[in-house]
Image (tube, coloured by chain):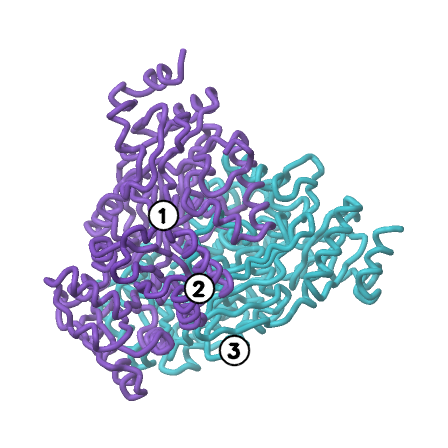
Chain colours: A cyan, B purple
Amino acid sequence: MSLLADLQNILDSEHVLTGEDAAPYLKDWRGRYMGKALAVVRPSSVDEVVAIVKLCQQYDTPMVTQGGNTGLCGGATPSNKGDAVVILMTRLNKILNIDTENDTMTVEAGCLLQTVQEAAEQAGRLFPLSLASEGSCTIGGNLATNAGGTQVLRYGNARDLTLGLQVVTAEGEVWNGLRGLRKDNTGYDLRNLFIGSEGTLGIITAATLKLYPLPVAQVTALLAFEDIATGITILNRAKYGFGASLTGFELISSYCMENVRRGMPEIKMPFEPEKAPWYALIEISDAESAEHARQLFEKVIEQSFEAGELADAVIAESQQQSQSLWHIRESIPLVSARLGQEIKHDISVPISKMAEFVAVTNAQLQTLLPGVKHAVFGHLGDGNLHYNVGAPDGQEEGFLDNQKAVYKVVFDSVSAFGGSISAEHGIGQLKKDLLLDYKDEVELALMRKIKRALDPHALLNPGKVISSVERY
Amino acid sequence: MSLLADLQNILDSEHVLTGEDAAPYLKDWRGRYMGKALAVVRPSSVDEVVAIVKLCQQYDTPMVTQGGNTGLCGGATPSNKGDAVVILMTRLNKILNIDTENDTMTVEAGCLLQTVQEAAEQAGRLFPLSLASEGSCTIGGNLATNAGGTQVLRYGNARDLTLGLQVVTAEGEVWNGLRGLRKDNTGYDLRNLFIGSEGTLGIITAATLKLYPLPVAQVTALLAFEDIATGITILNRAKYGFGASLTGFELISSYCMENVRRGMPEIKMPFEPEKAPWYALIEISDAESAEHARQLFEKVIEQSFEAGELADAVIAESQQQSQSLWHIRESIPLVSARLGQEIKHDISVPISKMAEFVAVTNAQLQTLLPGVKHAVFGHLGDGNLHYNVGAPDGQEEGFLDNQKAVYKVVFDSVSAFGGSISAEHGIGQLKKDLLLDYKDEVELALMRKIKRALDPHALLNPGKVISSVERY
């Protein structure tokens, strides 16, 4: 018998893909990573996942788990060796349970994030995880990468939204940890160990998630100001003035604003990008009313004007205006993809270091590559910037060849400021070697010990995050 | 050389305690666990902790880390073998840094929780972890046990309040993970693995904690109603009406109220314990004003009255009244200790199962021991009850002999309802064997693998939580 034949005994042959059928799952959506595989398999149940894992162990065959294939670091793409099986989770797509009294829902890992959001909303609840790819990413992928998004300031990242997991271990055993408990101090925190491990420690097959009340109103405002330090002062005003109603605080540079104007002239802007060097899109999710949210905004913005912090400010007068302000923010990555090549960094630093980090790093990059563009935006409230570097005018061609040198400048600086080289996108293939450069040896050694303990034959998503043995 | 002599080379002899000097640290504060040790050592720096750990490894000597010794499960008390060294962390008690722009503080593990709270408040910030022993417990102990307390509903438990850790590993290496980042997806979640591991995987020496805005006003109300199901309806009204301003929702049975009246007649109660079978103490932490908080209360309480849910309700008119309502709740454990023997359970179940759990378990206990008292109170908003069982009238003597039988009824029921046998107090010695009864084998096997990986010689707090080898 061969592995392929055995797989076909477990699954209908239409769910064991090879050749052309397998191709879409062997590259990432941006086309940056390409791999090969023995087969792409599509289980529809936990039992089938278990059977696949046991077969792969028997044949000493690497396994790469894939959800919606929307990752940015190549974590779900197999290597070029062609020795792996890709396990596609999208047929495990059932909403298993919604419990509105406990404010939890239990879903299979292959559910699209948007399906999860919609099911929660139909039950009169909010599942707050929200990110650009929500129409095609799976909740299992969100958990494997501990996804962030736009609501982290209030609700936390995927980890913070999860109470329980079901996981198939490297040996093909099922850990049934689908607990809907907000407090449970019975032993080691396995849940958080699997979350964010990018399929290298186990295969997440289902999760119990936290639900929240739907806000009565969401109102946004756009504020224009001189520098990041002022933005942080305003952030602190907003934290105090709005309390936990503050659900978004997004920083946007005028350069990004200008790009949106150029690339998407159809988008209405409340003021010209020349108004000020920096902008903040602030969102309140109010438990009372839109009017109450606007009153809170007026009070804080008035204080901020009086303190001389603001060049201008506009509060959305309607839900449509609120969405239109969000549209500016959400268009930034799309527009930058249209307008030219960028070297992207998803980094975090302590918020108190943010202004200095940007000033110092910008200057170092101008020394390295005079004229580069600083396309800086992101989740200031979380200390997370998408610190992107665009080609100098007229030097677009071959600009990405500078990636390694630009990475070094930016990540050295991130490291010096006590930051993270991957705030929300994970490690995958992209940053696996960088991890060795920027993590201390003790932490790497602890990670390798855990990897060896839970996946002794190094078959789970090898070549991603960290290697415990010389296999990869 | 001997271990003792070597320890005295590292520390001043006044910090290597034996005999009478060591005695206070060899039993828990309630006097339920007694142990022996080669010595109790009091390091004052991470370097000293490292040196102690390396010596203990060299001499194959178990290490028991102890903070304020306020635990309830014997997790910080050594065994009777007398072969261990107790490492007392209370001299590592410096506030290392407060960063109000990043809303973080970094503290050594031996800081008292109250010291941490006060330092935060002096900087104009809130560190929300709050529990009865805050004047004598250490933040390191809070982290080792993932402490809960009264503010979990809004702010989460100790785990949720922690961004970074410094840990001395079993081998005496230092993991410097004191990161003040709200987003960091660079590898496995070591932080949460150490938090809640009760000193069995490493020794937490410092932590970077989250800070929050100080609320402008905290207002409480006490509501009286017929049954737990109604309490849950009111909880959901409160979640919707107050949004994230809801910081406390404590359930109290009329039996507990009656005990407070009997045991502490000096405490003023807004109504007689006969008013209704159940009560909820609800707290709003408001970002605007006390008046605003009271308006929110009035609205929700009015809805609740109109729906026929309430027997009575009172909203605190002043901060003093708010504190006085909290005082009732906080007096319950003290009073029950005074009035008689109780078999205590710190459990959680999904909130949607709470009413049924209490009804079913009460009935089973009445069958087992007719006339037992149900001293039920706790954090309904977190699904966490202190489900305590008091002796029938006149049968106080020897009542604790029923502990094993009562545990079995209660924990079997908890398990049947998908709950946790230790919601916030941990496992320690007390529930180590119970863990084997109520955790599934796959989860236990995963825990043992992690224990073996990080503490291969089983020297870190052996005999607590879980054993990886036959040593204990």
Disc 2 sits on a residue from what chain?
Answer: B
Left or right: residue B437 compared with residue B44: right
**Identity of the residue drawn at 70% across and 68% down:** A91
* Mark 1 touches mark 3? (CB < 8 Å): no
* Mark 3 touches mark 2? (CB < 8 Å): no
Residue, disc 1: A353
What element does badge 3 sit on? loop
**Identity of the residue drawn at 77% across and 44% down:** A60
Decide which of A318, B113 is in the foreground and name it: B113
For disc 3, the neighbor class at 10 Å (few under 14, some 14 to 19, many from 20) is few
Is the residue at mark 1 from the same chain as the one at mark 3?
yes
Q: Which of the 4 image quadrants contains residue B288?
A: bottom left
Decide which of B207, A174 is in the foreground and name it: A174
Numbered circle sitting on residue B349: 2
Decide which of A71, B323 is in the foreground and name it: B323
Is the residue at mark 3 from the same chain as the one at mark 2?
no
Residue B24, image x, y percentages: 26, 33
For disc 1, the neighbor class at 10 Å (few under 14, some 14 to 19, many from 20) is some
The answer for how far apart the CA atoms under marks 3 and 2 are is: 52 Å
Disc 3 sits on a residue from what chain?
Answer: A
Q: Give the amino acid type for the residue marked by disc 2 in the picture.
A: Val
What element does badge 1 sit on? helix
Disc 1 sits on a residue from what chain?
Answer: A
Q: How many marks?
A: 3
Q: Nearer the viewer, mark 1 or mark 3?
A: 1
* Mark 2 touches mark 1? (CB < 8 Å): no
Residue B461, image x, y percentages: 43, 35
Is the residue at mark 2 from the same chain as the one at mark 1?
no
The answer for how far apart the CA atoms under marks 1 and 3 are is: 36 Å
Residue, disc 3: A266
Furthest-bottom residue in this view: B306
Decide which of A218, B278 is in the foreground and name it: B278
